[in-house]
Amino acid sequence: MEPGQGVLAKPALSAHLTRVAIGKREILHELALQLPTGRWSAIVGPNGAGKSTLLRVLAGLLPYVGDVQLLGRSLTDWPTRERARAMAWLGQAEGGGDDLLAWDIVMLGRLPHRPWLAAPNAADRAAVAGALRATESWTLRDRRLGELSGGERQRVLLSRVLAVQARVLLMDEPLAHLDPPHQANWLAIVRGLLARGITVVSVLHELNMALQADDLLIVRQGSLMHHGPCASATTHAALREAFDRRIGIYPVRDSWIALPEEAH
């Protein structure tokens, strides 16, 4: 049995949301979910459905009416540093830090593990080096973030998330700017994390990559339309409905792909 998959294992994340609003605009309403430990859940849906908002709420980055729990404990009950060790976040189009070297950017992921103002130790340096190598970014370590291409920058930011060595990873559009080989590498990284019992939650526009996940959360018009295994016919039907039946889901080898209906 994989770590975290026992019958008594608490969900990695759970939420019961009555309302989430940004300013006066309601984004999410009456939404409940439970995400199992040690699985990859991909959040998908049409533009403007509330996918990124949901992920940010799960990360504790937006106010909400309701309750969100991380590893069976309300987010509000977690001390900040302890929560930062348990859950790592990769946002969409993150800015700042352009003058920092890639090595230093990734080292920021180790801050929750160090006492205030303490210098990095051997474990921190090993975690950073391992993360950079995993994302094929080792050769970028001495370059400034502002000098990197979009894809190189994204790989460095992903390295920072990996360096945290958290039990739960939340990633919003992690494939942005990545070419196909590095998208494949990201998928291999995720598979390796899952094998160690780590939970991954990602917002993805790339439906074909999302269909490689264990589970899909399909968000539409501010609510959770469907939550189920990627291989399920019910999930495929819900995905087609979410996109107004303009896509089809077709088997390819041991997986599935989404194609525009007109192209099939």
Image: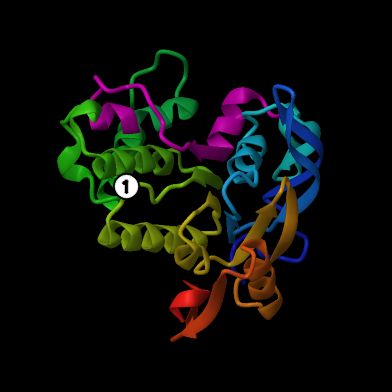
Q: Considering depth in this image, is 108 or 113 the residue closer to the camera?
A: 108
Q: Which residues are magenta?
A: 78-106
| Lateral position of residue 200 relative to residue 252, left or right | right
Quadrant, the N terminus? bottom right
Residue 235 lies in what quarter of the image?
bottom right
- Residue 211: x %, y % from top left: 52, 68
- Residue 179: x %, y % from top left: 27, 56
Taking the spot 46% from the left edge, 14% from the top edge, the residue there is 116
Whether 144 is drawn above or below 228: the answer is: above
Q: Considering depth in this image, is 228 or 246 the residue closer to the camera?
A: 246
Q: Is residue 10 visible?
A: no
Taking the spot 71% from the left edge, 76% from the top edge, the residue there is 234
Residue identifier under label 1: 177
Element at label 1: loop
Whether 124 is drawn above or below 203: the answer is: above
Taking the spot 50% from the left edge, 45% from the top edge, the residue there is 171
- Residue 228: x %, y % from top left: 69, 67
| Residue furthest to the front | 262
Q: Considering depth in this image, is 87 or 231 the residue closer to the camera?
A: 231
Whether 107 is drawn above or below 196: the answer is: above
Q: Is residue 162 visible?
A: yes
Q: Identify the amino acid type marked 1.
A: His
